C-alpha cells in the first residue's frame, strides 16, 4: 500500500506552516517532509534544515534531493529519504512552491495540490509579525503573490481566513477529499 503526496502551496503568510503543524499534531500518521533551505535555522520557524549554498550544492550534486527549487533568493530541497514513509502507506505533505509543481508531479504522479489562501490584509499582518522583511519587501512580496498553479494538476482549495483551529480542520478535511482537476 502506497501513501499519497500532497504539495501545500500558497503565498507567504497564508499560514501553511501553522496549518501543517496543527495537522501533524492531530494526525500522527501524516509525515511532514522537512525541507533543506539555504538560510540559517531560526527557533520557532518551520522544521527545516538550514544549510549554506555550498552545502546545498553538495547535496544536490550527490543526488540527495527528490525535489529542489529556487524561490525568494533562497534554494529549497526535500531529501529523497523524506518520502520513504510512502512505502508504508503514510501520506506525505510538503510545503512547496508553485514553480516546483511540474517537477513534483513528474516525481509523484498521484500528487495533489492543497492551495492555501488568505486575504491580502491578513497576509501583510502575518508577514510583518515574522519580522524577517521590511515593509517594502512585504509589499513587493504581496504584489507578486499568486494562487495560480500549472494546468492539469489536481487542486483542493483551503481558505485560511479564520482561526488556526478552523484552518487546521479545513486542511485535515482536504486531506480526505477528492481533488478537482
Image (spheres, grey):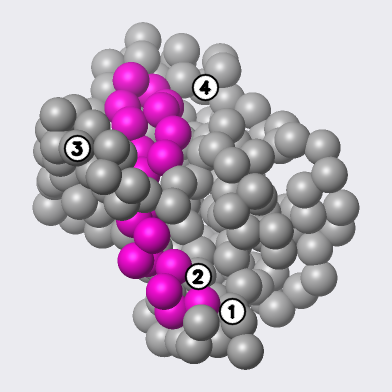
Q: Which mark is residue 92?
A: 2
Q: Residue at x 86, y 52 (%)?
A: 181
**Quadrant including the N terminus:** bottom right
Q: Residues within 10 Å of mark 2 (few under 14, many from 20)?
A: many
Region in magenta: 68-86
Contact, mark 4 vs mark 2 (Cβ under 8 Å): no
The answer to which quarter of the image holds residue 171 is bottom right
**Tag 3 residue:** 58
**Tag 1 residue:** 3
Q: Residue at x 44, y 79 (%)?
A: 85
Contact, mark 4 vs mark 1 (Cβ under 8 Å): no
Q: Nearer the viewer, mark 4 or mark 2?
A: 2
Q: Is residue 49 left or right of residue 116?
A: left
**Tag 4 residue:** 142
Q: Is residue 150 left or right of residue 1?
A: right
Q: Find the distance from the CA under tag 1 to the CA under tag 3.
A: 29 Å
Amino acid at each position: 500500500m502506497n501513501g499519497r503526496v500532497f504539495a501545500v502551496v500558497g503565498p507567504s503568510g497564508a499560514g501553511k506552516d501553522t496549518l501543517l503543524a496543527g495537522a501533524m499534531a492531530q494526525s500522527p500518521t501524516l509525515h511532514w517532509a522537512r525541507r533543506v533551505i539555504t538560510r540559517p535555522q531560526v527557533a520557532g520557524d518551520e522544521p527545516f534544515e538550514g544549510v549554506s549554498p555550498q552545502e546545498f550544492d553538495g547535496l544536490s550534486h550527490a543526488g540527495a534531493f527528490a525535489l529542489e527549487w529556487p524561490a525568494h533568493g533562497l534554494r529549497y530541497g526535500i531529501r529523497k529519504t523524506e518520502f520513504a514513509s510512502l512505502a508504508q502507506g503514510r501520506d506525505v505533505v510538503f510545503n512547496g512552491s508553485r514553480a516546483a509543481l511540474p517537477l513534483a508531479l513528474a516525481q509523484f504522479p498521484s500528487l495533489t495540490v492543497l492551495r492555501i489562501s488568505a486575504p491580502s490584509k491578513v497576509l501583510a499582518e502575518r508577514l510583518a509579525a515574522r519580522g524577517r522583511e521590511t515593509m517594502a519587501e512585504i509589499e513587493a512580496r504581496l504584489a507578486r503573490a499568486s494562487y495560480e498553479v500549472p494546468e492539469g494538476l489536481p487542486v483542493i482549495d483551503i481558505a485560511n481566513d479564520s482561526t488556526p483551529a478552523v484552518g487546521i480542520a479545513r486542511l485535515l478535511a482536504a486531506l480526505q477529499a477528492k481533488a478537482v482537476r
